[in-house]
Image (cartoon, rainbow, N blue to C red):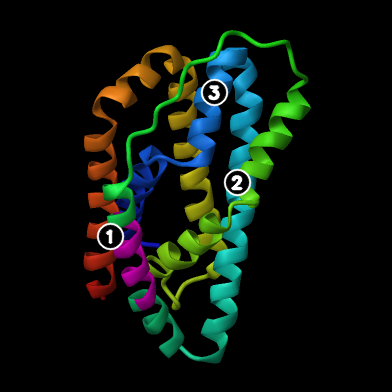
Amino acid sequence: MNLDTWLVYLLASIGLSLSPGPNGLLALTHGAMHGPRKTLFTILGGSVGFIAVVALSMFGIGALLQTSLLWLTVMKWVGGAYLVWLGIQVWRSPPIGLPVPAAAAPRAGWSLFRQGLLSAVTNPKGLLFFAAFLPQFIDPARSLFVQFVVMAGTFALIEIGTELFIAHMAHRISPWLERVGRRFNQACGGVFIAIGVVLPLRQ
């Protein structure tokens, strides 16, 4: 992956990580209930889950590439259309309203890790999203495994940083989302629409 492509992928991953989703909501809830230090288990579990989903998506795409490079072009355009559709759904979605709960009874770190992991791997929209998102950045002339390490590692680090911030700011972010959540959703939806329109056109 060349530097220009990686920088575009980095910006797109930041937009994805900031958009409303089940793992971000889980980090927000656990941050309020158990504190940011304990929520790190939840966040790490989710990151492992995302790496697994990225692996499944990328190596599934790699299997198609072995059949024909035409499939990559088809997947880019179908994926772009899906990202535009997803962006419209996010744009139109109501703001997240989450009453921040009081501190809960202590839970084992493994239990929180498992919940974060399951939240990432059992969300069918996650696999569908990455199947649409990743073909925009795959270079069939380069090692698929190296690209997987770079893409999965980049996304996991961004997700960990974003969710740690959410967990630390749980008591402040929830009221803020209730106030400006619709505009926030529109911004995130706009990012998805832009990715879906622009990236399939890149050579």
Instruction: Judge left or right: residue 195 versus residue 111.
Output: left
Label 3 secondary element: helix
- What amino acid is found at the position of numbered circle 2 in the picture? Ala
- What amino acid is found at the position of numbered circle 1 in the picture? Ile
Answer with mark 3 or mark 1, whichever residue precedes in sequence. Answer: 3
Label 1 secondary element: helix
Instruction: Examine the rendering and report whether any part of residue 3 can be seen.
Output: no
Image location of residue 200, percent across then percent down: 28, 72
Circle count? 3
Residue bearing the label numbered 2: 120
The magenta stretch is: 78-87
Label 2 secondary element: helix
Q: Is residue 82 magenta?
A: yes
Position of the N terminus, as image quadrant, is bottom left
Question: Which sits in the foreground, 99 or 173?
Answer: 99
Image location of residue 88, percent across then percent down: 28, 57
- What amino acid is found at the position of numbered circle 3 in the picture? Thr
Q: Mark 1 and mark 2 in contact (Cβ < 8 Å)? A: no
Answer with mark 2 or mark 3, whichever residue precedes in sequence. Answer: 3
Q: Main secondary structure of the magenta part?
A: helix
Relative to 102, say whether 74 is above or below.
below
- Residue at point 51% right, 57% down? 125
Image location of residue 127, percent across then percent down: 55, 60
